[in-house]
Amino acid sequence: MGNHTSKTSKALLHDILSQFSEEEKAVLLKEFEEFASDNDLQNERKHEKHGTGVTALSIKKQLPTVLGDYLKDGFMQYFQIQSTSTENYLSAEKIEKLTLQPSPSLLITQLGFVSSIRNLSKTIPSDQSRAAFIVGRLFQGSLKTFIQEVVRVSLTYWFEGAYISQTGQTKYRGKKGERDIFLNSDNTGIVDYLILFPNLKHGELEEESLFNLIKEADIGGHFNEGSFMDWYMKNTHFQHLFNISIIRIFLRRDLPQNLTDIIRTLKSANLIAPEIFSTYKALPNFSQLLAPSDYYILNSHLPPDCRVTTHKLLFSSTRDGDSWSTFINCILYQGSTLIVIKDKDGHIFGGFAYEDWELKPNWYGNEKNFLFSIKPKLRVFTSTGYNDHYQYLNYGTKTLPNGLGMGGQFDFCGLWINSDIINGNSMATPLSSTYSSSQLSKKQEFKVDEIEVWLVKLTEKDPDEIAKRPKCSALDRNPAELELLEMATNKKMYSKEVREPNLFIDEKE
């Protein structure tokens, strides 16, 4: 009978391992062998009546310190539950019994360990949601606290190797102590965003819904299984973050140093951050305006080809000053960019432009663009397809508005910066037609406090194809006639005639 059970377990183990890649399979078996090699357990394992296995203490001692004790306990008890049965589905009564009466001496078997990692990383979202619920339920905390822990751990791993100093040296490759840099980061924005995410409708903030969800998540210190599973299956961002934790802790603990293809694949899947070239000293202060959690959400919305590149701080008003000509010359024909703005009231917001910024008398861009808010609320507003007013940039003409705009229409943009780089507005009343974004700044008309521009993908344009000097329209050459025409018609003239852009703007012109 015992021999038959042993053969069945081996066949089941073989079947489960077949769902992993050869590399992952080798890692899992090696890890369990290391867990079992703990000398302190040799005597204990000999008299353990439940059979051959490893105690939770042995595994906990060898897991990385970035994983807090509460999450470690949740994983250990889940491994124990899986080790007591070969069933894929455990009854709620059995889970509750094992949760209320945890046994430190209950051994974790190789089959239980491997099946747990399979359930947490290789199953469909509906099955994975239940495994995640069990870990979270055993975590003995609230939903909000569970999310906070998962975010902290996953972002710590996500940002490994991201920072490139001014000397070109990549830092934070996961050496001892370097992961602790994010342990005390403020992740309030992303936690609230994740709690509300499945309930967010396009462009709607739903303040009352957010308040109620957070309040319910904190009541009683626990959360409901059905509600959690429904929330998890709809929440692609949390699924992704939870997967990062599982993959980096149990399947790929170290980044490959010289395997470019593997690194590129991990970045394209957003499993690790892009390399970030910043003039600021070190993470997490790679940016004056963005936290790592903010950057993760923005990067998640970038097209895949923008995640595998080096992200460079192209312009910073703190570093480069508040000259409009400097700003324009920094962003023209560079490639795909993230523009981040902080207004004098402390709101932080901006937009992503996939196409190069060009001086044009009309709207351009494509549906990959989006607007976003960082503070006081983390939100992303993608294209609605209602119109094609994705981005606009013009300067040095009386026939057209001068400034940078994204979404909506002239005088009613989702985001607008005047050509003095001091004043701007967000006239999304009630919502921007292009991105269905609400008002981004605290006041419709705002004063710029700080701007950063991040280059996330180099331009594909041939430098020889970029015109160097402008050609003015007829109306630009005759401003007096234009003013008379505007007075006579009582209308502002928006010329349709095309001016070739001046790549190198001179503020004195």
Image (cartoon, rainbow, N blue to C red):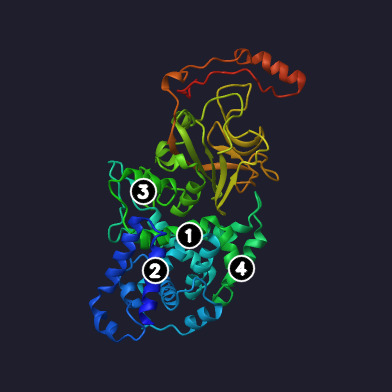
| Mark in front: 1 vs 2 | 2
Check the image and report above or below for 476 versus 61.
Answer: above
Which callout, 3 or 1, points at the residue further toward the start of the chain? 3
Give how far apart the Cα atoms at labels 3 and 1 are. 19 Å
Looking at the image, which residue is at 23% across and 77% down?
39
Q: Earlier in the sequence, mark 3 or mark 2?
A: 2
Where is 312 relative to 76, above or below?
above
Distance from Cα at disc 1 to Cα at disc 2: 44 Å
Res 486 quadrant in image: top right
Percent x, y of residue 403: 57, 31
Return the disc, 4 or 1, that comes first in the chain's sequence: 1
Choose the circle earlier in sequence order: 2 or 4. 2
| Residue bearing mark 1 | 187
CA separation in Å, label 4 and label 3: 35 Å
Q: In the rendered structure, which amino acid carries the disc numbered 4?
A: Ser
Q: Which residue is mark 4?
A: 227
x, y (%) of residue 59?
33, 72
Report whether residue 327 is seen: yes
Q: Where does label 2 land, which residue?
A: 11
Up the image or down, 29 lies above or below 287; here it is below
Q: Quadrant of the N terminus?
A: bottom left
Gap in Å between the C-alphas at discs 3 and 2?
42 Å
Residue 308 placement: quadrant: top left
- Kindly report the distance in space between the C-alpha atoms of the residues bearing marks 2 and 4: 35 Å
Tell me which numbered mark, 1 or 2, is placed earlier along the sequence: 2
Q: What is the CA distance from the residue labelled 4 to the residue labelled 1?
A: 23 Å
- SS for tag 4? helix
Between disc 4 and disc 3, the foreground one is: 4
- For disc 3, the marked residue is 162
Secondary element type, mark 1: loop
Q: SS class of the residue under badge 3?
A: loop
Q: Amino acid at mark 2?
A: Ala
